[in-house]
Image: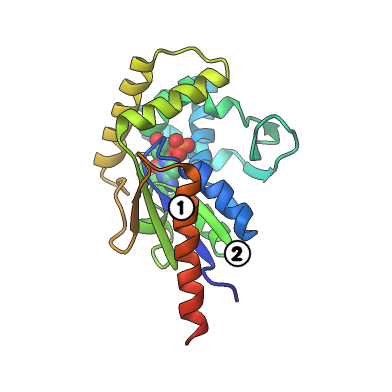
């Protein structure tokens, strides 16, 4: 059995989690799974149905009514995977600003988290996976053998997100992106259930002044350290 079976990467929006997770998975030949996708799909469907997103019960019910699927990328348009909502490709739609602005509210609901956490545990238990999110090392898979908490200053994170949006042709000002990031940070880290925080045994990496290559090398060093340790047992 290869060690570690599961690598969790948690941290705030724009810390570089997705890039790290994706590239790390390629290097290790593991599956990359971005858990924020599930919360985004639920939010998108809530918006499409014109639901009142403040209505916790109807959003919880909605989770039961939809099917979310993540599959290998079927198009070469910059995506790392396909996201399907009841069979429809919503890979890019879930990245829109409207979803960004509402996803924290939806992901703070207890019932929504419980249901999505169950789905995530089933996926994580298949092994050889890099799972990225906010509460993977704390709540979803607290026994994971390697937990990374990736952080960066809010200004650096907002700048990264701003360039990402610009590349996709969405024009918001840097100030808007910074403000939305601050709001999201506040909701994510102060919510009652599964707030964003490093697990006690997580290794905290600050990516503010590191390149992605430097972050990857650091994490690969940790993976190799674990492998050496287990081979000596
Ligand atoms: O990583 P992301 O920006 O795609 O995540 C979208 C939202 O989903 C974010 O506001 C927090 C929430 N989320 C969560 O609460 N728990 C997770 N494991 C992943 C994401």
Crowd rating for badge 1 (residues with CA inside 10 Å; few <14, some 14–19, many 20+): some
Residue drawn where x is 58% and y is 48% of the image: 23
Q: Looking at the image, in which quadrant does ligand 1 appear?
A: top left
Residue 34 screen position, x and y as percent:
53, 45
| Tag 2 secondary structure | loop
In the rendered view, tell whether residue 103 sits above or below residue 121: above
For the residues bearing labels 1 and 2, Cβ distance under 8 angstroms: no
Q: How is the image coloured?
A: rainbow
185 with respect to 27 (left or right): left
76 with respect to 187 (left or right): right
Residue 117 disc label: 1
Front: mark 1 or 2 = 2
Residue 126 disc label: 2
Q: Nearer the viewer, residue 83 or 154?
A: 154
60 with respect to 12 (left or right): right
Residue 68 screen position, x and y as percent:
61, 41
């Amino acid at each position: 059995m290869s060690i570690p079976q599961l690598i969790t990467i948690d941290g705030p929006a724009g810390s570089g989690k997705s890039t790290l997770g994706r590239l790390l998975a390629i290097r290790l030949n593991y599956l990359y799974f971005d858990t924020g996708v599930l919360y985004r799909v639920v939010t998108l469907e809530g918006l499409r149905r014109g639901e009142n997103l403040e209505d916790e019960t109807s959003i919880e019910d909605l989770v039961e009514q939809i099917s979310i699927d993540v599959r290998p990328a079927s198009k070469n348009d910059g995506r790392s995977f396909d996201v399907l909502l009841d069979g429809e490709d919503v890979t890019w739609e879930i990245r829109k600003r409207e979803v960004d602005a509402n996803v924290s509210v939806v992901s703070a609901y207890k019932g929504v988290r419980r249901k999505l956490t169950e789905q995530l545990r089933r996926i994580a238990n298949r092994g050889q996976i890099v799972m990225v999110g906010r509460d993977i090392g704390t709540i979803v898979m607290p026994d994971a053998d390697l937990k990374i908490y990736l952080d960066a200053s809010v200004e650096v994170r907002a700048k990264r997100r701003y360039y990402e949006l610009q590349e996709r042709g969405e024009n918001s000002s840097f100030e808007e992106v910074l403000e939305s990031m601050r709001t999201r940070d506040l909701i994510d880290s102060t919510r009652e259930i599964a707030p964003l925080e490093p697990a006690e045994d997580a290794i905290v990496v600050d990516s503010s002044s590191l390149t992605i290559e430097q972050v990857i090398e650091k994490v690969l060093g940790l993976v190799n350290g674990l492998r050496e340790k287990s081979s000596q047992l």
